[in-house]
Amino acid sequence: MTPTRRQKIEAMLTDDPDDIFLRYSLALELENEGEWQAGLDILEILARGTPPYVPAFQMAAQHLVKHDRPDEARACLREGIEAARSQGMSHAAAEMAEMLMGLGAVGEG
């Protein structure tokens, strides 16, 4: 039987458990399989890393919006914008700012 994408990622993580991109990929795969909270947990760990993994903020915010948690998504985006700016990632900061504006003010969504 051919291993699933998730199984392949998990096998690679066994060899290199600190690989940020593999951990990020696993989070996305978990979301695809309907295990969105487990995926979100991984994204939050990556966002709290040193340095914070900037793509994790935007993806976590997307998960939160999809699961009707817009206030948490806004907070995540605000943190992500700061992390992106501190790492000189102006494009990522602009993308998250645009998403944040699209969510509207607190209490609207």
Image (cartoon, rainbow, N blue to C red):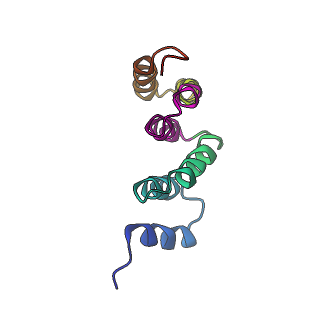
Left or right of residue 5, residue 49 in this image:
right
Q: Is residue 37 above or below residue 82?
A: below
* Residue 6 x %, y %: 43, 67
Furthest residue to the left?
2
At x 65%, y 44%, the residue is: 49
The image quarter in which residue 32 lies = bottom left
Residue 74, magenta (yes or no): yes
At x 38%, y 72%, the residue is: 4
Q: Is residue 26 above or below residue 93?
A: below
Q: Is residue 56 above or below residue 39?
A: above
At x 49%, y 70%, the residue is: 12
Q: Quadrant of the N terminus?
A: bottom left
Furthest residue to the bottom?
1
* Residue 28 x %, y %: 44, 52
Q: Which residues are magenta?
A: 53-75
Residue 68, magenta (yes or no): yes
* Residue 9 x %, y %: 45, 67
The image quarter in which residue 97 lies = top left
